[in-house]
Amino acid sequence: MLWAFGCSNTYGFSLGTSFSVNKFIKKYPDNDDRKSLWHQKVAKVQHKSSTLSWPARLAEKLKTDVTNLSEVGSGLDKCITNLQKIESKINWDNDIVVIGMPKIFRYFAIENNHVQLSNTIPMGAPATESLELFYQAMVTYLETNYPKVKLIRIYKTKDALESTPEINFFNTHGLNHFEVGLRYPCGHYNEETHECFAEYLSGLIMELNNENRTRH
């Protein structure tokens, strides 16, 4: 079994909806709200993680089942909360557990709301420096208490993530390789990128498993 936690790009938001990107862009060529309008359009029809997401494609390549507990808008703190809820169901000797690392400036607020800071910090929100420290603390917590969880970077970023030890696919291979058709109007990765990501991870995981067998 493969267990996955993360945000919308691990959930697979927008994948497989068959909405025409060209028609949508033609309808909203210069609309500042285009991103949110596409998001609303997809949210009306997609109510669960996509079978085309990289965790689902990865599980297929590894010939195992998948449970994707990612949530749209989720921060790393919510990923940890969701992991804690079901950790007793995980076979830690045989299952694979992955977290597609969300962006740093997201956190789990009151009444199950997911919050992401933009250029301005809303009243009552943590300072960005506090969130960076919080994020680093959560990574340390995962390394200490869940050493078998694979932390996977899914965003190219230059912030506190740089010092975390997760698999860094996009920075290793370069985002430019995927620029053509990379994203939907809402900013989420498309099917091609999810497939490429799953293909890379499957090879890496099988390589690590072979190394572990050799050592034993």
Image (cartoon, grey):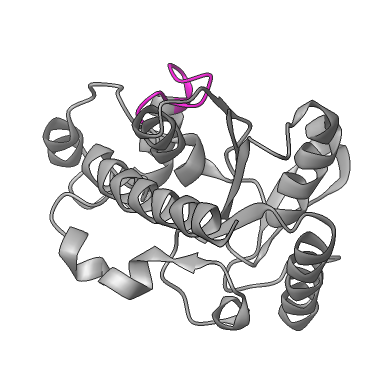
- Kindly indicate the quadrant of the structure image that contains residue 63: top left
Q: Is residue 176 left or right of residue 84?
A: left
SS assignment for the magenta stretch, majority? loop
Q: Is residue 44 magenta?
A: yes
> What x and y, as percent, mark residue 148?
69, 53
Is 51 placed above or below 141 here?
Answer: above
Q: Residue at x 17, y 64 (%)?
A: 177
Q: Is residue 130 left or right of residue 209?
A: right
Q: Is residue 39 left or right of residue 2?
A: left
| Nearest the eye: 216 or 74 | 216
Give the magenta part as a residue range.
43-52
> What x and y, as percent, mark residue 205?
45, 51
Q: Is residue 39 magenta?
A: no
Q: Residue at x 79, y 26 (%)?
A: 89
> What x and y, as percent, mark residue 34?
33, 45
> What x and y, as percent, mark residue 116?
64, 58
Q: Residue at x 78, y 77 (%)?
A: 127
Which quarter of the rendering shows the C terminus?
A: bottom right
Is 3 placed above or below 201 here?
Answer: above
- Kindly indicate the quadrant of the structure image that contains residue 73: top right
Which quarter of the rendering shows the N terminus?
A: top right
